[in-house]
């Protein structure tokens, strides 16, 4: 398995002078996902929790809906110049009766760590209909609980603390417990990893959980939450216009600029309880 962090020498310049020292960097390596031996997508990710990432990706693309839909997941032989396996190619076999990904998913594009929908031709091509409608979820959370979530998430961002270079995603309950937290150089990968964890735990649909992300709320992250049946997405930073529109279409609650006791409620205010 690839390293989560990599140490490199750095020359640090400050008003008080300069010095050379080792610096910890977040690792970034390609992961090729295959289904039944056929290449499906390549993403730049932080190594670790790759099986969760793959499950979460297929869930958010509408290919699978439960852990029983995957028969096996295994690393393929992919070696570096020294002959060591890089563990950068993961092949998943679908369970009997589960349809293969259609042509909308089998797209030959390169997914960077910052954008998960790059290469999809148009908005209509990326909008997916969830099998787990989040609009009817009775999930509610108080403003007090929401205000404390970013600090709780930061406490569990161990790799971020060492590198300052990773996004994080966490699943939270109405009382503010974080069920799972995952980090990655790509915000969409962090979400896929945490959704994959939930799927492997048999928790899908996540109608009684919210999703917290350490950065902004994009269209894609709202869609991933909707595909898992989650009624709420809370982000430390800003949402995009399409994220707000999609959240409203799916009857979801979208919270942005969640910083301390301050937050913006963009959609689904009924799920936010004051106090």
Image (cartoon, grey):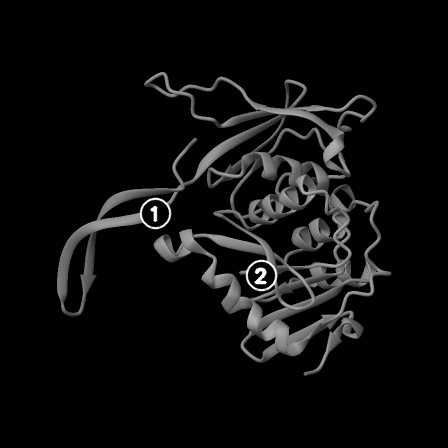
Q: Nearer the viewer, residue 179 or 73?
A: 179
Q: Residue at x 65, y 62 (%)?
A: 240
Question: Can you see residue 41?
Answer: yes
Which residue is painted at 54% across and 77% down in the image? 260
Task: Classify residue 143 by image quadrant.
Answer: bottom right
Relative to residue 14, is residue 48 depicted above or below?
A: above
Against 165, residue 66 (above or below) is above
The nearer-to-camera label among 2 and 1 is: 1
Alpha carbon distance from label 2 to label 1:
22 Å
**Where is residue 251, by image quadrant?**
bottom right
Q: From the viewer's perspective, tell me whether residue 241 is left or right of residue 179.
A: right
The answer to which of marks 2 and 1 sits earlier in the sequence is: 1
Q: Which mark is residue 216?
A: 2
Q: Residues within 10 Å of mark 2 (few under 14, many from 20)?
A: some
From the viewer's perspective, is residue 268 above or below residue 197? below
Q: Quadrant of the N terminus?
A: top left
Secondary structure at numbered mark 2: loop
**Mark 1, residue position:** 25
Q: 10 Å neighbourhood of mark 1: few (<14), some, or many (≥20)?
A: some
């Amino acid at each position: 398995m690839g390293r989560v962090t990599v140490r490199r020498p750095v020359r640090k310049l400050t008003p008080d002078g300069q010095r050379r020292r080792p610096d910890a960097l977040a690792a970034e390596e390609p992961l090729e996902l295959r289904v039944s031996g056929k290449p499906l997508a390549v993403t730049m990710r932080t190594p670790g929790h790759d099986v969760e990432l793959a499950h979460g990706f297929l869930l958010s693309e509408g290919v699978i809906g439960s852990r029983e839909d995957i028969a096996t997941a295994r690393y393929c032989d992919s070696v570096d110049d020294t002959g060591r396996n890089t563990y950068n190619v993961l092949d998943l076999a679908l369970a009997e009766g589960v349809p293969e990904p259609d042509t909308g998913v089998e797209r030959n594009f390169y997914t960077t760590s910052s954008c998960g929908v790059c290469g999809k031709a148009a908005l209509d091509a990326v909008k997916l209909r969830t099998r787990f409608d989040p609009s009817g979820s009775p999930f509610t959370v108080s403003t007090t609980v929401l205000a404390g979530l970013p600090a709780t998430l930061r406490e569990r961002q161990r790799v971020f603390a060492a590198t300052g270079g990773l996004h994080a995603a966490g699943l939270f309950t109405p009382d503010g417990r974080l069920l799972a937290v995952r980090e990655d150089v790509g915000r969409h990968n962090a979400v896929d990893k945490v959704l994959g964890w939930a799927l492997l735990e048999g928790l899908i649909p996540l109608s009684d959980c919210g999703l917290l992300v350490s950065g902004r709320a994009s269209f894609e992250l709202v869609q991933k939450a909707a595909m898992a049946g989650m009624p709420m997405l809370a982000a430390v930073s800003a949402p995009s216009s399409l994220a707000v529109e999609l959240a409203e279409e799916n009857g979801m609650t979208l919270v942005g600029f969640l910083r301390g006791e301050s937050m913006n409620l963009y959609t689904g205010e009924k799920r936010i309880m004051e106090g």
